[in-house]
Every structure is written in C-alpha cells, then in structure tokens.
Image (tube, coloured by chain):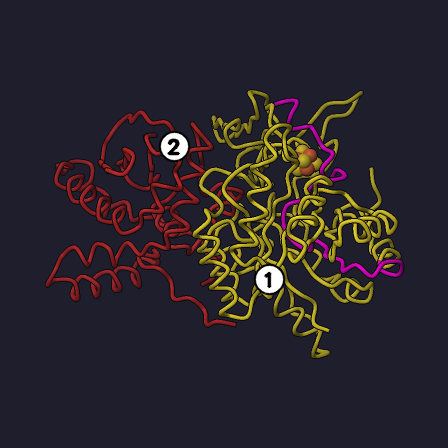
Chain colours: A red, B yellow
Amino acid sequence: MSVATQPIPIFPPTAAIPLRAMPLAPLSLALTAACRRISRAHPGLIRRLGEHDHCAFALDPTDLPVVLLLEPNGGVPRLRVMRGEVASDARISGPLAALIGLVHGAFDGDALFFSRDLVISGDTGAALALRNAVDDAELDLAEEFSAMTGPLAAPMRRIFAMAERRTGVALTRPEEAGTW
Amino acid sequence: MVMEIVCPAGTPAALRAAVKAGAHTVYCGFNDETNARNFPGLNFDRSEMREGIRFAHAHGAKVLVAINTFPSAGNEALWHRAVADAEACGADAIILADIGLLDYAARHHPGQRRHLSVQAAAANADMINFYAGTFGVKRVVLPRVLSVPEIAAINAETGVETEVFVFGGLCVMAEGRCSLSSYVTGRSPNMNGVCSPASHVDYHEENGVLDARLGGYTIHRTGNGESAPYPTLCKGCFGAGEKAGHLFEDPVSLNAEKLIPQLHKAGVTALKIEGRQRSRSYVAQVVRNFRAAVDALEDGRPLPEGMLAGLSEGQAMTTGAYKKTWR
Ligand code: SF4
C-alpha cells in the first residue's frame, strides 16, 4: 500500500455529460443496494459513525454534475444520486478519483485536505467520523459491485480493472506492499 | 541495538497496516476519554483491542495502550477499567500520564509494564527517576521541547528508556499543561482527549479563500492554492502588538528523520510517530520510511532520502525543538 503522490485524475467532461440528463433513480436504487450490502458485511462502518449515524453526508465529486447523498440511517443506509442543491449535515467535495481513492486507502484524507484537493464543510466531526469509519473498513468497491452481479462477477472485475488502467482512478483496493 | 519504531494506530486496519509495514511496536487507545486521541470514528473497543494485540503478537510486534488523559474527579473508575482491560487484552505496556493512575496501576497491576506519557511532561532526569523509583516506570516519552544535547544529558542520568517523537503533528507547549483548547471549545487534550476538537471546527470557502474556524473564531485564512491547515489553536494566526502572524508555532509538521543517528548517539531507545488520527495509508508509508532508516543505521548504510513532505500539515516540515531556538 502506498499513498499516491501523482496528480489526481479528473473525470473526462465529455464522459460526464450523460449524467446531466439521464434518470438517476435506477442508479440511486443500485447504489443503495450496494451500500446496504456493504454495511451488512462491515458492521464496524456504522458503529464507528457513533452519534453521527443519522447524519446526511453529501459526497460531491467536483468533476461530475451530480452529488451523492449518503444517509446511514443507523444501519439501513440510503445512497441517492442527485442534481442541483443538496442539503446535508456534512459535505465532502473533491474530484471523483480523490473520493474513491480515499475509500480504497490509495490516498491519505488529511494529506488531500492539506493540499485542498478535498474540501470539507458543515459538521467536521461527522465528516471525520465517516472518513475514519471508511478507512477502517478496508473496502474494495469494484469487488463489492462485481459480487452483486452474480454470474457476471468475473467479467465485471475485468471491466473495472480495464477502467482503472485507462482512467488512473483507484477503482479497486491497491495491492498491499509485502509484509516487512 | 536497533532503534524501536513506535507507530500510531487509530483503527484496527491502521494497526495491521503498521505491523505489515515493519512497525516494531504500535500504540493505540480505547474509544473513550481515557486516551488523548478521542476523535470521532477512531480507536478500539475491547474486542478490537484483544484481536489487534493478537495480530501484532503473531507478527512479532508489540502493542502499547495509551491511557494518557487525566481522570476526572468522581469518574476514576473509567480509567481504572481501561488499565485492567488493557492488561487482560495482553498489552505489552500501558502509557500513563496521571500520577494517581500510575499509583493505581503500580498497586493493582504490578505485572503490567508502565510507560510515562508525553502528557506527563517529564523533561529532566530527576523527574523521570522519580517516576521510575515511585511507580516502576520503565520508559518515558519525552516532551517535544528538548534539544538533542538535552536528551543526551537526560539519558546520561537515568536508566529509564527514552522514546522521542520523530514525525507528525507538533504540540509545542509543555504537554499536559496546555489549556488553549479549553478556552475556545471547553474541551482539552488533558481532560477529554481532544485538542481543537472537530466538533467545534468549521470551514468556509469563498472565491478560493478558505477560513478555518474553531468555536466560531477564524484561526486561519488561506488564499487560493495555499495549503489548508487544521485550526489547531497554537498554530493559528494572531495579532499581538504591531505584529500579526503565527504567534506560537507555524502550521508545520515534525520530521526528525535526518536526526536519527544523533538521537541514537544520545541514547534514545525508541522513535515515535505521531498520528493516530491519520489513515492506514499514511501510517504504512511513514512506517516503511522510518523502518528503512533505522535498518540502514543498524547496517551502517546511509539513510534513505525522505519523501514524506506531501503528507504533512501545511506541507512543510521542521526538526522542531531538536534544533530550534524559540521565538
Ligand atoms: S493547542 Fe497546541 S500546544 Fe496546546 S495542546 Fe493543542 S496542539 Fe498542544
């Protein structure tokens, strides 16, 4: 595992265009299902949120025309993709690659914050709790999504691996460097 | 003898990352006010602690449990329970700051190794020898206000092992005695385990200018493209007399990796990395770097060049008091 020091890739603007018009409800449903699966598999995630487990977190990829609203709901999470103004208790903004890289431990949250690649507003305590809870869970989003597709898991993994190579975004949890 | 690398772990994942990255020893704390990094989402419940210690021992690493805040009157049982539970979980040592708690641990848990926390601010040999003679303290974490010659002088006059900070955030006061955070937030590292707590922090960005506020007061204002600090009070910008600026300390991080050979010569046993609030990727990278440095020192090879600047607050580093003349 190493902290990425190269510049953070920005989502290609042309590829983001469909998100401006496409219906978001199916995407929200799929993401909510994935979130619930993840929270069941990693109960520590909700536990670590503590008093913040009913907050609304806006995850704002600054290179996409949408915002993800994450509501942990004390263990029955909901993740909605939304456009326009989104009210929340805490907001974490930054390039999509930074947000995903954070989940995968490819980046250090504080380092991204010091360099202002990541901006936090609203309830800083809640944002920190989420960051710490996610860091402890050692998630691999590509793996979680692939596993949801049943028989299609193997091709999905290959698609994620290819997308990762093409975009430079850490879509999977990076290989850990060998034990000392 | 190889210098011991003592690494932070705010979560079980960070503990595993530190051990795999080559930490000889990891320090961590319970998820309550008994430890000085009582941050949201961090720390270990009892079963995580037991499992973390088991993992570290299986990989040949040690675990120190920090119970290093000062028990509040009438609520000492919380701290007593932490001492008992750390021992039951198999901790290699507990890190304590409060004299009463040291006394309690020495009487009720005599078999449990005791270290003196930096929070006790033991900065001379007489004080350290007192803690050793009275409470059986085996190691002291020295406050970050000493120069290398002062550390050598301490080691010449005590048989107690010394551990010094080499990397991470700086706490510039005589530790355990700073109440700056209490004035603005009502919460302090000494009593609640948090300095400038996140619950009182908010950021406001307008036209690229970022205000970092603590308890409603703007502590920092950074322009477009400048790195953002956390609004820790001692590293804020203040006006005094005719001058405005960082009155106490610049928002920089400690990096004493180049001083490792001198610290070794000064008789230091262990090198401590600050940052239980940091991510597992930070922990892994810093640990790897320092482990490579002490192994090089042991083998008589030149120390590898550091590459940790991007990880530090203000993205700037200092050797702190080890080479410093105070303002
Ligand atoms: S305000 Fe600064 S000197 Fe005081 S406890 Fe906090 S970090 Fe240490």
Image region (quadrant) for ligand 1: top right
Three-letter residue code for mark 2: His
Q: Give percent across and percent down for residue B69.
A: 64, 39
Q: Secondary structure at mark 2?
A: helix
Residue position for label 1: B25
Q: Residues within 10 Å of mark 1 (few under 14, many from 20)?
A: many
Q: Is residue B219 left or right of residue B145?
A: left
User: Taking the image as drawn, is residue A71 in sight?
Assistant: no
Q: Is residue B275 left or right of residue B152?
A: left
Three-letter residue code for mark 1: Thr
Q: Is residue B131 left or right of residue A39?
A: right
Q: Is residue B299 above or below residue A115?
A: below
Residue range of the region highlighted in magenta in the rendering: B155-184
Label 1: chain letter: B
Residue with the most extreme left position: A151
Instruction: Name the residue at 20% across, 36% down.
Output: A20
Please count the marks in the image.
Answer: 2
